[in-house]
Image: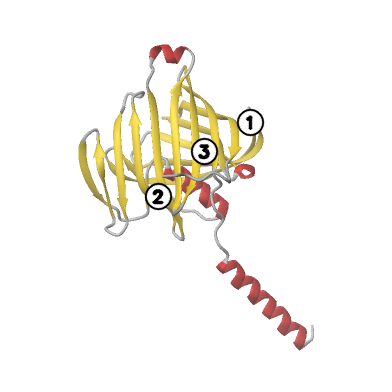
C-alpha cells in the first residue's frame, strides 16, 4: 500500500469510528400486543401498548381473567409507566398500578425525581420517599430497558427496581437463544432473565429481534416452578400513533 493510499485508508477508518461513536441509539418501536396468559391452572389475557409522547414514551399493561378464571375473579391489573430514552438508558418518570386481581392487590404511585435523585409516592395509601443511588426502574420500565439494551447491544449485569418494600438490586443475564413458535408467528428469541435480590421469583423474557426485541414469551418461576406464562398471540406496530398524555 502506497503512503497516499495508507493515509486515505486511515482517514476512512477514523471517519467510520467517529460516525459509529456519534450514531444515535436505536429507539423502541411503538406497538400494541396481546398475550394469552396462564397463572397456575387459571387463564387470562395481557394487553400491552407502547406509545411515543413529546418527551419519551408511555407504556400500559393490563391483565384480565378469561374463561373459568373470570367466574372466580372479575378484577384486573392495570399498570402504566412513563419514561424517557436517554444516553444512560431508560429513565422512568412516573409509574401507576391499580390491582384488584392478585393477592397483593392495591394501588401504587411512584414519581421519579431525577434532579433530587428521589422516588416519591404511595403504596396502598402509605406515602414513601426513597433515595435513588443508580438508574432505577419500575416493574414496567425495566422490560423496556432490557429491550432498549438488546436493540443497542448494551446492557448491565445489574439494575435497580422498585418493589413494594423499596428499591432492590436486580441481576440480569442472557440465557441464550432459541426458535419459538407462538400464535403470532415463529421467531428466533433471546432469553433475558432477571431476578430481584432476595426474591424467590425469576422472570424470563424471550425477546424477538424481528419485533424490536418485544418479548414473545414471558415466564415467571418461583423456586424453579413455573407460576406464570404469557404467550404472544397478536402484534401490531403503531409507528404513527402518539400519546395525547
The disc placed on residue 55 is: none
Q: Split into 4 quadrants, where in the image is the C terminus?
A: top left
Q: Separation of disc 3 and disc 2 at Cα?
A: 16 Å
How crowded is the residue under tag 1: few (<14 C-alpha within 10 Å), some, or many (20+)? some
Q: From the top left corner, tell me how far across and down residue 95 is, in percent.
A: 35, 42
* Kind of element beneath mark 1: loop
> Foreground: 182 or 237?
237
Where 185 sits versus 86, above or below?
above
Q: Where, by quadrant of the figure, is residue 212 drawn?
A: top right
Residue under the image location 44 percent in, 54 percent down? 55
* Kind of element beneath mark 2: strand
Q: Which residue is mark 1?
A: 184
The disc placed on residue 205 is: 3
How crowded is the residue under tag 2: few (<14 C-alpha within 10 Å), some, or many (20+)? many
Q: Which residue lies most toward the left here?
A: 126
Lateral position of residue 131 relative to residue 20, left or right: left
Q: Split into 4 quadrants, where in the image is the N terminus?
A: bottom right
Query: Closer to the N terminus: mark 1 or mark 3?
Result: 1
> Foreground: 56 or 212?
56
Q: Which residue is mark 2?
A: 159
Q: How many marks?
A: 3
Residue under the image location 49 percent in, 35 percent down? 48
> Foreground: 202 or 150?
150
Query: Closer to the N terminus: mark 3 or mark 2?
Result: 2
Q: Separation of disc 1 and disc 3 at Cα?
A: 16 Å
Amino acid at each position: 500500500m502506497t503512503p497516499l493510499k495508507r493515509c486515505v485508508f486511515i482517514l476512512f477508518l477514523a471517519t467510520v469510528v467517529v460516525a459509529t461513536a456519534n450514531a444515535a441509539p436505536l429507539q423502541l418501536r411503538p406497538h400494541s400486543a396481546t398475550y394469552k396468559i396462564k397463572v397456575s391452572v387459571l387463564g387470562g389475557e395481557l394487553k400491552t401498548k407502547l406509545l411515543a409522547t413529546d418527551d419519551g414514551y408511555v407504556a400500559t399493561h393490563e391483565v384480565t381473567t378469561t374463561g373459568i378464571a373470570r367466574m372466580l375473579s372479575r378484577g384486573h391489573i392495570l399498570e402504566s409507566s412513563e419514561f424517557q430514552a436517554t444516553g444512560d438508558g431508560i429513565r422512568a418518570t412516573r409509574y401507576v398500578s391499580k390491582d384488584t386481581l392478585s393477592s397483593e392487590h392495591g394501588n401504587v404511585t411512584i414519581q421519579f425525581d431525577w434532579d433530587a435523585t428521589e422516588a416519591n409516592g404511595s403504596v396502598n395509601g402509605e406515602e414513601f420517599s426513597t433515595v435513588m443511588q443508580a438508574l432505577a426502574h419500575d416493574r414496567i420500565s425495566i422490560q423496556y430497558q432490557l429491550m432498549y439494551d438488546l436493540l443497542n447491544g448494551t446492557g448491565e449485569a445489574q439494575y435497580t427496581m422498585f418493589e413494594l418494600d423499596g428499591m432492590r438490586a436486580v441481576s440480569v443475564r442472557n440465557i441464550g437463544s432459541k426458535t419459538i413458535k407462538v400464535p403470532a408467528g415463529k421467531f428466533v428469541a433471546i432469553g433475558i432473565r432477571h431476578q430481584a435480590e432476595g426474591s424467590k421469583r425469576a422472570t424470563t423474557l424471550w425477546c424477538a429481534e424481528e419485533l424490536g426485541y418485544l418479548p414473545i414469551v414471558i415466564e415467571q418461576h418461583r423456586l424453579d416452578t413455573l407460576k406464570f406464562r404469557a404467550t404472544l398471540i397478536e402484534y401490531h406496530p403503531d409507528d404513527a400513533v402518539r400519546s395525547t398524555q
